[in-house]
Amino acid sequence: KAGQRLLDIGCGLGGPARYMAKRFQCSVSGVDITEPFVVAANKLTALLRMEQNVRIELGDGHRLPYPDSHFDGAYTQHVTMNVADRRRFFAEAYRVLKPGAFFALTEHGWGAKGDPHYPVPWSADGTGACLVTPSETRAILEKTGFEDIVIEYTGAKYVASYKVAIDKAEKGALPPLGIHILMGETALQKTRNAARNIEEGRTHPIQLICRKPR
């Protein structure tokens, strides 16, 4: 709602943070561990004259630079695939949320049909990848103290969008700006593998929302 404070953990270039701030007239703090992303995010925010509503800073999701019970909601998008210590990561999100606040995430969960094909958007060769099953994610959140956990399995939606991106890439029709720039020369291969992994049951994408008890 207007006037509320949200937190974007692993905000990257800050696009979702700016979107949320503009759509809901709220203030959004973003934190990311990659300094060039933070620099670029703040430049983009300034170009859009949104500095009053969006603030991006360098930081680690395991040690958030915010006080207890500060935010009305928090979210993290496609970050946890590279988070080894999920208990600490989720505990920090829990700490900075007000009672009753929501926590939402999207991630590629570990599938049941073998190791993923690499490279993928979050890892070139498996290095730094820390996937767990959706049930493990739920269990860690419950142990942290979150409740009202709702999980939606998003594999079919992801495959459909990946195939659109693959088709555009093969035709040379990708937009001038997009995530393919960040993924580099292997962007098409990563996208193909991301779709293939879902179709073969090697990864299991989800979106999830839960709450800190009141």
Image (cartoon, grey):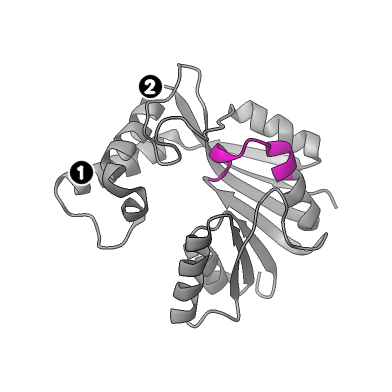
- Residue beneath disc 2: 200
State the image coordinates of residue 188 (x, y, percent, origin top left).
26, 41
Is residue 48 visible in the rendered image? The answer is no
Say which residue appears at 68% left-offset and 33% top-offset.
138
Determine the secondary structure under disc 2: loop
Q: Is residue 189 magenta?
A: no
State the image coordinates of residue 60 (x, y, percent, origin top left).
65, 53
| Magenta stretch, residue numbers | 79-90
State the image coordinates of residue 58 (x, y, percent, origin top left).
61, 62
Q: Nearer the viewer, residue 111 or 209?
A: 111
**Which class describes the residues within 10 Å of circle 2: few (<14), some (14-19), or many (20+)?**
some
Tell me, for residue 156, which label it has, or none: none
Separation of residues labelled 1 and 2 (CA atoms): 20 Å
Determine the secondary structure under disc 1: helix
Is residue 61 visible in the rendered image? The answer is yes
* Residue 4 horizontal side relative to residue 25, left or right: right
Q: Earlier in the sequence, mark 1 or mark 2?
A: 1
**Which class describes the residues within 10 Å of circle 1: few (<14), some (14-19), or many (20+)?**
some
Q: Amino acid at mark 2?
A: Glu
State the image coordinates of residue 151 (x, y, percent, origin top left).
60, 37
- Residue beneath disc 1: 167
Q: Is residue 80 magenta?
A: yes
Q: Is residue 191 above or below residue 98?
A: above
Q: Nearer the viewer, residue 184 or 190?
A: 184
Q: Is residue 74 above or below residue 123?
A: below
